[in-house]
Image: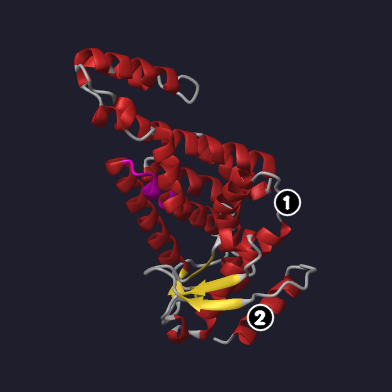
Amino acid sequence: MTLDQVNLLWNEYKEKYDLDTDVQIQAIQYDTPEGVEGCFDLIELIGGKYILHLNKKFHIYTENYIRFILFHEFTHFYDFIKSDFEAREDLFLYMNSYSEFHACKVTLFRFIEILTIESIHVDKIQIPGPFKEISIRRLLEESLWRTKIGYETFYAMYQPNDFVSAFRLLMYLFGYISLFKADEEMIRQTLRILRVNDPNYLFLYHSLKENNVENILHYTREVYKGAFLMFLRDFIRRNYDDSIYTEDEISELNEDNYEDFLKALDRRQDELEEGFSIAAMTNPMAAFVEGCLKA
């Protein structure tokens, strides 16, 4: 697609969703990683570079799927333009949670004006796929499967980038499911399948539906804190001698006491192994944040 063609669709999007701005996409680059259909780089957007990144295979997709993907990415651009955050961290949290939810909700709703379990047959109603149309059921099943794999990978390795990827996929699912009348039960079933027991996810879902910005930021932070504590416990088990701590101590860790506990572990480790200092290793919070930013 040419830049003019993309901006024609962007103008159509702005008209449909009442976005009053003259801002246009400045460039297209076909350079997304394998498996990523399109994206805007948030750092580029913050710097005033409105570049749409697309998959190299984009030109061979079906016309409807191209529009499906572009309206998804346009929603991210829309959310960025409409956002007004003083702290960059708040913007990142909002774009990684609400904007992913919003983009999936918009793209699915665009092709199905009324979507309810009572009136829409999830097997027969077709929506755009890259090379042929697919059923809503398939969309939901594949999204759930990818999200499940993402969380299982995180639970196995506790790598921050795995968590961020899984969380983003779950926001996709939240967006799709929000269009169903039976969404509450579907969300609860989804979280059970994913083995996600943190109640903050359910609170976050309700906040996303209401677009309650304050609660979105709060519960997104709480979810990230929960993932960090999982990462931290694994970090301790991998890097400290198991004779200097108990599992009860690890289970009681939280965001308020973990720094003091790590200092105590350093002292115990030094006493156990003279000349060895755990302080030379990467700080676990810094490692977690760095891993999140790489996702």
- Between disc 2 and disc 1, whose residue precedes? 2
The image shows residue 196 at horizontal and vertical percentages of 41, 39
Up-down relation of residue 12 to residue 18 (above or below): below
The answer to whether one can see residue 180 in this image is no
Magenta stretch encompasses residue 162:
yes
Q: Looking at numbered disc 1 in the image, what kind of residue is underneath it?
A: Asp
Please identify the residue farthest to the front as the structure is shown.
275
- Percent position of residue 242, x then y: 21, 21
Residue under the image location 43 percent in, 34 percent down: 285
User: Which amino acid lies under the numbered mark 2 shown in the image of this protein?
Assistant: Asn
Element carrying mark 2? helix
Q: According to the image, label 1 marks what residue?
A: 84
Q: Is residue 261 magenta?
A: no
177 vs 247, left or right, is right
**Residue to which mark 2 is pinned:** 7
Q: Which structural element holds mark 1?
A: loop
In space, the residues marked 2 and 1 are separated at their CA atoms by: 24 Å
Along the line of sight, which residue is nearer the eye, 129 or 18?
18
Q: Is residue 106 left or right of residue 142?
A: right
Identify the disc placed on residue 174: none
Residue 22 in view: yes
Identify which residue, 9 or 7, lies in the foreground.
7
Is 40 situated above or below 248? Answer: below
Q: Residue at x 53, y 59 (%)?
A: 176
Q: Position of residue 78 (x, y in %)?
A: 68, 64
Quadrant of the image for the N terminus?
Answer: bottom right
What are the residue bounds of the magenta stretch? 158-165
Counting the numbered discs, the total is 2
- Residue at screen point 51% across, 53% down: 171
